[in-house]
Image (cartoon, grey):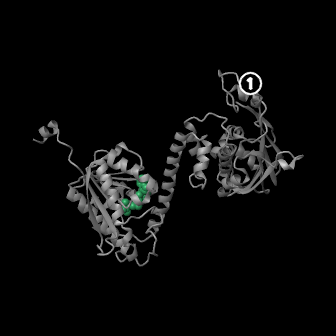
């Protein structure tokens, strides 16, 4: 089984630079032994104009079976399963998951985007052409296109006839694949490394828990945004449900971070909201922070979490009042946090002031020990950024695990949207809002949360309370119910 990678070039930018990137000299044919057979790297052509590297893997089907990883193999020490299919199978010929393993072994530096001899080449895109003459593709040519096209490849996938003498037998499950595109070599290798076994969809290797780390590492930058990321993840992890779930959670986190980073960009380019009080949404943000600070004072809180703190506007507000002795901003977006640190001028703060504030990166959908033991937590305009199905995870992490005495939650009141002149009917206020609730929906959710976790809850309007549609922002104030008195705590109280 084999694949070729070709590029074109000029005298100024010779195609043979491919050899530097692959760490394999175009003038030599080299062989590497892998656990399944021998991998050869050779260059059928190597001129400044065109250069092609071929990876050819000679699979030893007997070695494959001995390693207990062949199709239907029982493994070392298992009952002897001598079915012929173990020895006579497509593995030596088709570009299966084994080819991906060989690719990872032989071109490991190139895959990681390392090139000591010519580091400047790594970031450059090249006109690349990848050819795989026999690619087992479960899902056919259509799936092949769905997997590679979103990554910027022009895809030609020709189904291979099962037997040319008997056209009526139709196509086999193999395709002849050609990919063409302007890509960085390391990206191309990382696409192939993941997608060849995904298309093969045969479980020829043991899936170990560190496979999730490997997938996320190799998929960094392209997998989270891929429209088929669910299928890719589940097939790559050989449909091992627990691993797939773990990977999906981590991918979701990466997607969130990326989405929120683009949010931050928008906010960053907008006018500074505190100075521009003409715009209604701006005035609303100011009113919201005032309402939050008021509620925190009312609750007597001094150690406060700002969960989903964004660029730290509330943190800055809280710093002005010395009653807030510990202020911790938490956000999933590193970019938001670094902007917050800059805006707060943390570097230039005096020591006492700096000791009052901390910024932490974390996701609110995972329990986090660092968030335990605070007087209050604020979730200001955060819940609507989560997919509804992730909301129970946030609920558990905040109300079940961190359990601050007071929790303030604000969210838009969707009924009010008809009052925004600039908002087309039926639209949410922000592109990243996954939902916006009516007052009744918010109450239902908040009451159920309070009930489940032993909190009492009250509702406050923020902004002008319209007689028909209510206020633009709704706020719930949760207070932890006093724990049932035990003799010990009574004694302490006395
Ligand atoms: N609290 C601020 C920012 C609201 S925007 C304010 O009231 O203006 C929503 C913020 O929630 C963003 O900064 C986003 O990065 C953060 N966020 C979204 N999902 C999150 C998650 N799962 N964990 C932590 N932060 C998250």
The residue depicted at 51 percent of the width and 56 percent of the height is: 258
Helix, strand or loop at mark 1 = loop
Left or right, 167 with reference to 236: right
Dividing the picture into quadrants, the one containing residue 290 is bottom left
Quadrant for the N terminus in the image: top right
Q: In which quarter of the image is the C terminus?
A: top left
Residue at image coords 82%, 45% = 162
* Whole-percent x, y for residue 119 in the image: 65, 48
* Total tally of numbered discs in the picture: 1
Q: Which residue is drawn at 52% across and 40% down?
A: 242
Residue placed most toward the observer, 180 or 45: 180
Tell which quarter ligand 1 is in: bottom left
Most extreme residue toward the left is: 494
Task: Name above or below for residue 148 compared with residue 37.
Answer: below
- Depth check, front residue: 120 or 447: 447
- Residue 275 located left or right of residue 192: left
Which residue appears at 52% of the width and 44% of the height?
245
Residue 344: % across, % down: 35, 59
Farthest-out residue, front: 168
Mark 1 is surrounded, within 10 Å at the Cα level, by few (under 14), some (14 to 19) or many (20 or more) other residues, namely few
Query: Percent from the top left, x then y, of residue 139?
Result: 69, 49
| Vertical side of 251 occupied by 29: above or below | above
- Residue 472 spot, x, y in % from top left: 34, 70
Q: Name the residue under label 1.
A: 82
Is the distance from the Cβ of mark 1 to the nearest ligand 1 atom less than 8 Å? no
Image quadrant where residue 346 sits: bottom left
Q: In this view, does 392 lie above or below 411?
A: above
**Residue closest to the eye, 264 or 57:** 57
Asked whether residue 78 appears in the rendered view, the answer is: yes
Residue 310 appears in the picture as rendered: no
């Amino acid at each position: 089984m084999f694949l070729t990678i070709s590029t074109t070039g000029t005298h100024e930018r010779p195609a043979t630079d491919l050899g530097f990137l692959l760490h394999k000299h175009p003038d030599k044919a080299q062989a590497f032994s892998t656990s399944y057979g021998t991998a050869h790297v050779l260059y059928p052509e190597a001129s400044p104009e065109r250069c092609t590297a071929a990876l050819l893997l000679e699979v030893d089907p007997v070695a494959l079976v001995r390693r207990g990883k062949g199709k239907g193999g029982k493994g070392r020490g298992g009952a002897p399963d001598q079915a012929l299919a173990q020895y006579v199978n497509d593995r030596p010929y088709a570009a299966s998951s084994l080819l991906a393993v060989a690719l990872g072994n032989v071109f490991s530096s190139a895959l990681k985007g390392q090139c000591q001899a010519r580091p400047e080449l790594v970031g450059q895109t090249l006109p690349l052409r990848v050819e795989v003459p026999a690619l087992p593709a479960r899902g056919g040519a259509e799936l092949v296109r769905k997997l590679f096209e979103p990554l910027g490849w022009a895809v030609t996938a020709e189904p291979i006839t099962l037997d040319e003498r008997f056209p009526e037998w139709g196509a086999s499950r193999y395709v002849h694949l050609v990919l063409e595109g302007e890509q960085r070599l390391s990206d191309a290798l990382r696409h192939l490394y993941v997608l060849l076994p995904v298309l093969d969809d045969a479980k020829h290797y043991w899936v170990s828990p560190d496979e999730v780390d490997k997938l996320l590492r190799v998929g960094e930058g392209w997998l989270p945004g891929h429209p088929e990321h669910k299928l890719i993840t589940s097939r790559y992890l050989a449909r091992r449900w627990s691993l797939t779930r773990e990977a999906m959670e981590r991918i979701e986190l990466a997607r969130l971070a990326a989405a929120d980073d683009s949010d931050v960009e928008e906010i960053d380019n907008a006018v500074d909201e505190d100075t521009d009080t003409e715009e209604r949404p701006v005035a609303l943000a100011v009113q919201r922070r005032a309402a939050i600070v008021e509620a925190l004072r009312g609750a007597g809180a001094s150690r406060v979490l700002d969960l989903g703190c964004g660029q730290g506007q509330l943190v800055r507000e809280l710093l002005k009042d010395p009653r807030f002795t510990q202020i911790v901003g938490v956000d999933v977006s590193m970019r938001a946090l670094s902007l917050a640190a800059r805006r707060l001028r943390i570097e230039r703060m005096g020591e006492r002031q700096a000791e009052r504030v901390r910024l932490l990166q974390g996701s609110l959908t995972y329990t986090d020990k660092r968030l335990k033991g605070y007087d209050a937590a604020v979730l200001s305009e955060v819940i609507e950024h989560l997919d509804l199905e992730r909301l129970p995870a946030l609920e558990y992490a905040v109300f079940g695990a961190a359990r601050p005495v007071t929790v303030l939650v604000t969210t838009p009141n969707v009924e009010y949207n008809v009052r925004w002149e600039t908002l087309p009917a039926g639209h949410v206020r922000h592109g990243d809002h996954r939902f916006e609730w009516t007052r009744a929906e918010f109450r239902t959710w908040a009451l159920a949360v309070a009930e489940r976790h032993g909190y009492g809850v009250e509702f406050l309007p923020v902004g002008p309370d319209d007689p028909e549609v209510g206020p633009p922002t709704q706020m719930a104030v949760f207070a932890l119910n006093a724990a049932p008195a035990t003799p010990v705590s009574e004694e302490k109280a006395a």
